[in-house]
Amino acid sequence: MTERTLTPDTETATPQAPAGALRTSDSTAPAGRARTAAGTSAAGEKATGTARGGLSIQDLILVAVLLAAGAVLKLTVGSLLASFGMKPNFVIAAYCLAIILIRPTLAQSAVIGLIAGLVCQIPMLNATPLLNIPSELLGAVACGLLIRVPMKIGGKFDANPLVNTFISTCVSGFTFAALSVYINVVSVGGSFAVAMAAYVAIVLGTATFNAIFVQILATPLAKVLKR
């Protein structure tokens, strides 16, 4: 008689999850991750205060502080230097410095120039009302275009603040001069060329002063602000 030994089955069945549950889980996970990522992105955007496609709150504060400082310097130091024959325009230097540091779009540069022109309408800052609005607008647009032009010398020294501010100040200064001459001289029968010649030295002197001023401040401020 043959004995048969029964060997217990050592394999344990693994419970299977219902197919429907797997499909639900698979379809839910990516959506959940997408919602989480979107929430994180929105939270990060809110934390940095950046408007989509616009300037950050920090950029706006920087523009406001620089324009206010430029107005104060024009009113105080500018008036003092004017008594020695120099006529620096610190408002132009301020918005050029702001545009160079934050590198806005061309439209945003135009808005900064428009704001600077409105600041210049303060009676103590401007003897000819309204002319600074188009002149500062064009100066800021020129600055916004020139910030995209690489001007590094030797791979280290960035001459963009110097050249950019000089040209932008000339654009603003000669626009202001042309409008002023047309209103005050040409309209009464005077010579446009003769009257403009009187502004050349003033505009070039202001542009040189502003260019050196911005070049000195641009590098250290960029490092401090981590730009």
Image (cartoon, rainbow, N blue to C red):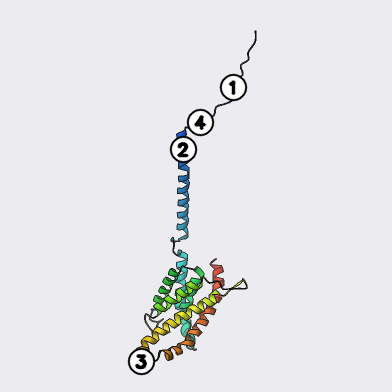
Q: Give the answer, above or below, for where 154 lies relative to 79.
A: above
Residue 99 x %, y %? 48, 71
Question: Residue drawn 48% across and 79% down?
Answer: 169
Q: CA distance from mark 1 to mark 4?
A: 19 Å
Q: Amino acid at mark 2?
A: Arg
Question: Residue drawn 48% across and 36% down?
Answer: 22
Dot 4: within a 10 Å radius of its alpha carbon, few (fewer than 14), some, or many (20 or more) residues? Answer: few
Residue 18 x %, y %? 47, 32
Quadrant of the rendered image containing residue 221: bottom right
Q: CA distance from mark 3 to mark 1?
A: 116 Å
Q: Which residue is mark 1?
A: 9
Do the numbered discs 3 and 1 sit on residues whose CB atoms are within 8 Å? Answer: no
Residue 44 x %, y %? 48, 56
Dot 2: within a 10 Å radius of its alpha carbon, few (fewer than 14), some, or many (20 or more) residues? Answer: few
Q: Which residue is mark 2?
A: 23
Do the numbered discs 2 and 4 sit on residues whose CB atoms are within 8 Å? Answer: no
Which is more N-terminal, label 1 or label 2?
A: 1
Q: CA distance from mark 2 to mark 3?
A: 86 Å
Which is more N-terminal, label 4 or label 2?
A: 4
Q: Is residue 75 visible?
A: no
Q: Which image quarter is the N terminus in? A: top right
